[in-house]
Amino acid sequence: VDLSVDLAGVPLPSPMMTASGCAANGREMHRFIDITELGAFVTKSVKAAPVSGRPTPRMAETDSGMLNSIGLQGPGVAAFVEEDLAWLHSIGARVVVSIAGGTASEFAAVARRVVRSPYASAVAAIEVNISCPNVANRGLVFACEPSGSHKVITLVREEVPRGIPILAKLSPDVTDITEIAAAVVKAGAHGLTMINTLLGVAIDPVRLRPHLAATTGGLSGPAVRPVAVRAIWQVSAAMREGRVPAVPIVGAGGVRTGADALELLAAGATAVQVGTAAFNDPTAPLRVGRELADALDALGVDRLADVVGIAHEGGL
Ligand code: RRO
């Protein structure tokens, strides 16, 4: 089975990626799997300056999935480039660098540092995280606001050379995700990653107060997979109807198996990220790729590209 994909002009040998934030910046996961075998390794969203993150506890397991309120903890872009991106470059990984900012110009400044670094040849794409749920205003500053989202992508695009595609990562917590998708693609995004976590609250049943110090957190894991499939479906349908310019979709949301990945692909995704499943099983992103190949083989499909969006066309 041919699993290769074309991500907005960048050829990847596999559709499988990590999901931002779930394997830090690569070293931990590389102890368990060879991360250069992934289609791409996606880094934790990085801001201009170091961030200490939200108060603890900031992770909670619920029977419906994982809730996090990390709050963009990270080393800042200078240390990220010199320590993490340099290392990822040295091992030959394809890297999707996730960037974040409190203002549109901060996003642009972070992008600039990354693409002008000596390690830019390792950068397969820039993923612009306009959808973190764990910041002031519930992260909805850009996430559910078309004009703010448009501005972020416009400024980032001015800094990023042709040849490095820009992916916009969208939130499921919006009234109409096709409206945000249209705004960011019109601003120059070459692809869309869907979805970020879904805002939630979990309450400790004994102490009867929120599990997380910050109260709210982002829900991830199998419970959100139908939400991801819905978002991918809606945007893919809007692209087919000409309401959103057609660009590749990178799917993310509760993928644990090859069958789960196939579901996102059939809904319209070209590539698939694995996040929460990697906490229990750091081999999950590569394992899911092997399971996907077996599932396609069993269906008699030779090329992954043949199933992208196939559910919109009546299926197999
Ligand atoms: O760091 C976080 O708390 C975080 C981010 Br930036 C994000 O985009 N999604 C999420 O669930 N957590």
Image (spheres, grey):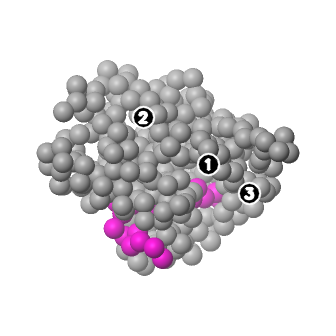
Question: Within the magenta stretch, is there residue 308?
Answer: no
Say which element carries label 2: helix
Above or below, comparing residue 6 to residue 23 in the picture: above
Q: What percent of the width, then of the height, locates residue 262?
A: 32, 43
29 left or right, relative to 94: right
Above or below, comparing residue 31 to residue 61 in the picture: below
The quadrant of the image that shows the N terminus is: bottom left
CA–CA distance between discs 1 and 2? Answer: 18 Å
* Any part of residue 95 in sight: no
Query: What residue span does the magenta drawing correspond to?
Result: 31-48
Q: Which of marks 3 and 1 is nearer the N terminus?
A: 3
Q: Mark on residue 229? A: 2
Query: Residue at image x 42%, y 60%?
Result: 284
Q: Earlier in the sequence, mark 1 or mark 2?
A: 1
Q: Mark on residue 285? A: none
Q: Is mark 3 within 8 Å of ligand 1?
A: yes
Q: Which of marks 2 and 3 is nearer the N terminus?
A: 3
The quadrant of the image that shows the C terminus is: top left
Q: What percent of the width, then of the height, locates residue 253?
A: 48, 43
Magenta span: helix, strand or loop, mainly? loop
Above or below, comparing residue 175 to residue 184 in the picture: above
Q: How many labels does the image show?
A: 3
Q: Mark on residue 66? A: 1
- Name which residue type carries label 2: Val
Q: Which of the two marks, 3 or 1, is nearer to us in this view?
A: 1
Q: Mark on residue 53? A: 3
- Name which residue type carries label 3: Gly
